[in-house]
Image: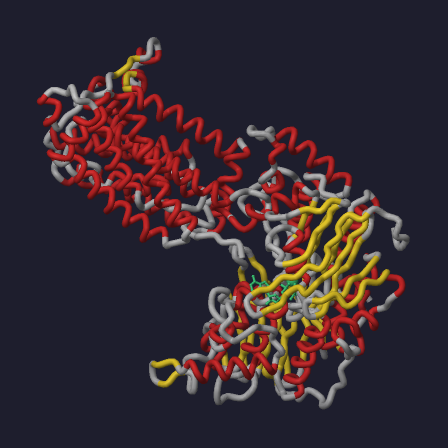
Amino acid sequence: MADVAWIESVLSGAVQAGTVYLLASLGEVYAERSGILNLGLEGMMIIGVAVSFIFTNALGHGAALLVTMLVGGLVALILAFMAVSLRLNQIVVGLALTLFGLGLSGFITSAEIRKGILLSLNPNLSEATLVTQQAPKLPNIAIPVLSEIPLIGEPLFNQNILVYVSYILAIVMWFVLFRTRFGLSLRSVGENPAMADAMGVNVYLMRYIATVIGGMLGALAGAYLFIGYQPFWQEGMTQGRGFISLALVILATWSPLRAILGAYLFGGVEVLQFRLQLLGVGAQTPQFLLMLPYLVTIVTLTLLSFEGVKKRIGVPAALATPYSRE
Amino acid sequence: MRGGDSREILVEMRGITKRFPNVLANDRVDFTLLRGEVHALLGENGAGKTTLMNILYGLYRLDEGEIWIKGRRVNIRSPRDAIRNGIGMVHQQFRLIPTHTVAENVILGLKEAGFYLNYSDINERLREIISFYGWNISPSARVWQLSAGEKQQVELLKALYRKADILILDEPTSVLTPQETTQLFATLRKMAGEGLGIILISHKLDEVMQVSDRVTVMRRGRVVATKPTRETNPNELANLMVGRPLITSFERLNKPSEKPILRVENLRVLDDKGLPAVRGVSFTIRRGEILGIAGVTGNGQQELAETIAGIRKAVSGKIILDDMDVTNKGSMFMIRQGVAYIPAESSKCVAYQMSVAENLVMKSFRYEPFSKSIVIDWNSIKQHAERLIDAFSIVTPSPNTRAGNLSGGNIQRLILARELTGLPGSSAPKLIIATYPTRGLDVAATEFVRRTLIQNRDQGAAILLVSEDLEEIMMLSDRIAVMYRGEIVGVLEQREFDVEVIGMMMTGAKRGEAA
Ligand SMILES: Nc1ncnc2c1ncn2[C@@H]1O[C@H](COP(=O)(O)OP(=O)(O)OP(=O)(O)O)[C@@H](O)[C@H]1O
Ligand SMILES: [Mg+2]
């Protein structure tokens, strides 16, 4: 059963499913490194799905991606305002935003409203486009030479543009976080805001920026989920992927590079349990696989409870703690 | 420079006033700092020293007054403005990120570092400064691996790397060993020689006399005097601060009885990292006796005290209180047995977000009259708080003030008040474990704490006193045990007390070798 083609397709599926998690958790790594826990991620993701669904049909992929990120950033701005400026409880605000996102996405995609938005954006749309539940998928772009590599060439280098963007983002975001002044400031406000403030870092600004980046990438993950992976609209189609991304941030111990591995692990498990079901493997195995990512996350959390490990890895010490100067 | 006022004026603060709700923390304060001087800022707890410096560093906004830096009027709105004006500050509590490296801590917030951080260049410059001052830290070490003295060097590095020429140090010696203090002072003199102006907040008069060029004394938010150090003396300074001379020695009223209160037998304890911290320690303390534990911080004193207080588990050995085995019984049990514990770090036993009254009753709120069945009687808690605030002279606007808003010294008084008051209905504490009880306290408060301990001793309490201040330990103790690497290297009787001998033993020399 496990011939090369099958393995290749599972790997390819792992990358495709994992990219949702990767994009979302990259943003969340930044937010959490700055001390903001964004439990609204699920909401931002589903808003991203809905917005990209509508805008792709109205204006095409490029505009859809831009608008999605803009909207994600705006929703994150609400979170930043409440959590940073008003110093409200981040858990409550985040969960409220998730509920808000689920509601809003359902509202703007409901038949009448959607039709209205589509027509106001582009009056020349055909009747079919106005009622479709689908959108054109992003095309795959095979990278010459690299995609020829046996086994991993296909899965890694014959994907759509957003997958490539996620590779580049992971590397760039790692570099910025650990090798630049901006990244140092960001990590510091999540570790000890009072001291970062004393060193002349604008704590509020850093936290706003990080939260907005988190929201933009959360929404982009939603857009990818739709136009890059499953371009068929269903209400609530994120199915907890935002929350899984939150778990992934812990598993990746707040590192953009480790997030890649974690994302493909989660993605791989998702694909594998589906494939195994198709192959008619006993029902327990897929169920067990679905549990695996959480098991790994719990083990990571347990390890992180040891003081020594915590110090080495750098769990943001001021996570979910508001800051005020006097 | 030592005198001579022709130097450039680095800082001039004029008529600074700062009000907090119900407190006038600074009242028309004038203060100047000259280039090349070490200027000591003295004052009781809550006098407003930290507030004044926080204003200069942009952490607090002033209500009235002007700040002039190097002849220019400036408006300092944030630490960023302060840094731009060449000001660096080392806070009472270190402001470092333990998980980051020395270099990362130093360059945090520094615009000139550029977007991409070139660590090889940065480390090079850091190494230059480090070797100029004869320190021994590595730029790539993680801060949690460093000792207190080294952490302070990182704080100084932050200011030096930014080419600060105005340096504020808020009680920098309170966490240092005597050796580290000596090294720090050498560094400060060297910095002054390089043309920096240094403001040093301290409560230790001998240190002020030793290292400073000028002294400014504050009292209740006002400046009461500024004098060249060589024209004054410790007595006069104490007088200016407190308004009366201080007691420096204590009479013993009665002899300790023969009855042992605390017996520790072959105790072994691990530290937070799971390494042996206390290695087979045995001693007894009798009724009405003070046993001093001398030693450089980090030689197991902390773990020893915590184990006796019931908040750390012993691996083996016995703790016997009044003929009862109390090993590993937990803190609640120990409190009920009349054991009081004054911890070294106030942050570990004060809830900053809760009020002074709530903090004061934290040990006894389960009992009458504070709790009646399951209901808390806030009235009696408030009265209790007012009594203690009065008895221990805690400076606070009201019992309902957040404990976190008290000055450092007053937080310490709050802890003492709570710990040294027995549970309702029970007598005074039987055993007092005091670790560094006067750290960060002003001279009057220090005197107060010492007097309180002596009073408790005279009433029959057994006291375990952990301190690195040799003068203090020799003044108060009936016997001194010296700890080194988790073991007691020797015990001295009062007639054998000698700074040199104890100092030698603190570095591990056995008694015979040291004498
Ligand atoms: N953030 C704040 N909010 C309210 N009151 C404050 C605040 N900071 C300081 N105070 C009050 O201002 C007064 C001066 O405090 P400050 O910390 O300047 O004293 P200090 O001289 O540094 O004392 P110590 O030697 O104990 O550190 C105190 O009465 C204190 O309670
Ligand atoms: Mg102070």
Spot occupied by residue A6 in the image (x, y as percentages of width and height): 20, 21
Q: Which residue is drawn at the image coordinates 26% and 21% (left, top)?
A: A61
- Please indicate, yes or no, whether residue B501 appears anywhere in the rendered image: no
Spot occupied by residue B72 in the image (x, y as percentages of width and height): 74, 44
- Please indicate, yes or no, whether residue A66 appears anywhere in the rendered image: yes
Q: Is residue A134 left or right of residue A75?
A: left
**Quadrant in the picture for the C terminus of chain A:** bottom right
Of the pair A153 and B363, the residue shown nearer to us? B363
Q: Is residue B211 above or below residue B133?
A: below
Spot occupied by residue A143 in the image (x, y as percentages of width and height): 33, 12
Q: Which residue is drawn at the image coordinates 70% and 73% (left, top)?
A: B446
In which quadrant of the rendered view does residue B137 lie? top right
Q: Is residue A78 above or below residue B351?
A: above
Q: Is residue A190 left or right of residue B13?
A: left
**Quadrant in the picture for the N terminus of chain A:** top left
Of the pair A278 and B411, the residue shown nearer to us? B411
Q: Residue furthest top?
A: A145
Of the pair A101 and B63, the residue shown nearer to us? B63
Q: How is the image coloured?
A: secondary structure
Regarding ligand 2, which quadrant of the image does it lie in?
bottom right
Q: Is residue B208 above or below residue A179?
A: below
Q: Is residue B343 left or right of residue B371?
A: right
Q: Is residue B380 left or right of residue B307?
A: left
Spot occupied by residue B330 in the image (x, y as percentages of width and height): 46, 72
